Image (tube, helix red, strand yellow):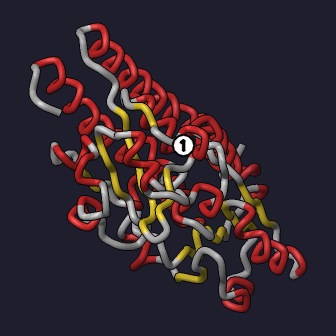
Amino acid sequence: MNFLENWLPQRIVCLTEETTEWLYLLGQEARIVGISGYTVRPRRARAEKPKVSAFLSAKIDQILALQPDCVLGFSDLQADIAAALIRAGVPVTVFNQRSVDEIFAMLYQVAAIVGCAEAGAARLAALRARLDDIAAEAGALVRAGARRPRVYFEEWDEPAISAIRWVSELVGIAGGEDIFPELAAEPLGKQRIIADPAEVVRRAPDIIIGSWCGKKFRPERVAARPGWQDVPAVRHGQLFEIKSADILQPGPAALSDGVEQLHRIIGGWMRASIEGTPR
């Protein structure tokens, strides 16, 4: 079946981090000829691969000079980049995954594109099994008397933007309840802006998790917001950071390191609630 290799892409440009990380995990990094400048996972990719794009912009001439036979992108926000490359004759695939199931589907399709469908499916099955285990552990805590904590996940601070769909779903898997489930269904950040910060106070989250894309989360600034001193999470010091590269990347990171951090934070709160520790 070696002749099939001739039909697989040999020179791939990844416009976002998740496909880069996934191809490295599959042992297919030799196929990558260009990556996003925002890539931090895996760290070695930054040293090994040319950086040819941001998120909303790309160095089209540099990408064309790499002579890619496959470009992988993410979301409607990269439509203009994709259109420019398509007009130049480059094969482009843009995924639009926003949910946990859609992330799994994207990862399987990318694995198939590079001839690793079987290996990809095995890795995805392991990730799925771990999510099931985490959900089962949360369920066991509820049966033992724990309450599911109300969780406010903030992915930007000015203006405040709440969790995207896959993050909201992972919060639920880990045992929490997203306090803005109606906003999680919105695909764009501007659609998840919290117009009135007092609404967070009214919904009284037990846990606040910050993941400010591209900058450090400052819990002291959140705690100092007007009226927020009465929020349970602020009263009891339940403010945490998860790095955006671990949770806001709709790929392997969110399904592994991201959800594990949610599991530790939320599971810790639930266990403490059983023991009677103030929360």
Image quarter of residue 255: top left
What is the residue that sits farthest to the front in this orientation?
A: 227
206 is higher (above) or lower (below) than 136: below
Between 277 and 140, the one lying in front of the other is 277
Question: What residue is drawn where x is 42% and y is 76%?
Answer: 46
Spot the residue most to the bottom.
Answer: 61
Left/right placement of residue 226 relative to residue 162 reads left
Residue 271, position in %: x, y? 18, 24
Foreground residue among 112 and 259: 259
Q: Position of residue 165 (x, y in %)?
A: 57, 44
Indicate the position of residue 193 as horizontal and vertical percent values.
56, 59
Q: Give the vertical position of 68 relative to 98 (above or below).
A: below
* Residue 116 makes an appearance in the image: no
The structure residue drawn at horizontal position 68% and vertical position 66%, both measured from the top left corner, is: 10
Point 25% across, 29% down: residue = 267
Asked where in the image residue 52 lies, by quadrant, the reply is: bottom right
Give, as a three-letter code, the residue at label 1: Trp
Q: Nearer the viewer, residue 155 or 250?
A: 155
Q: Which residue is mark 1?
A: 166
Mark 1 neighbour density, 10 Å: few (under 14) some (14–19) many (20 or more): many
Regarding mark 1 in the picture, which secondary structure is present there? helix
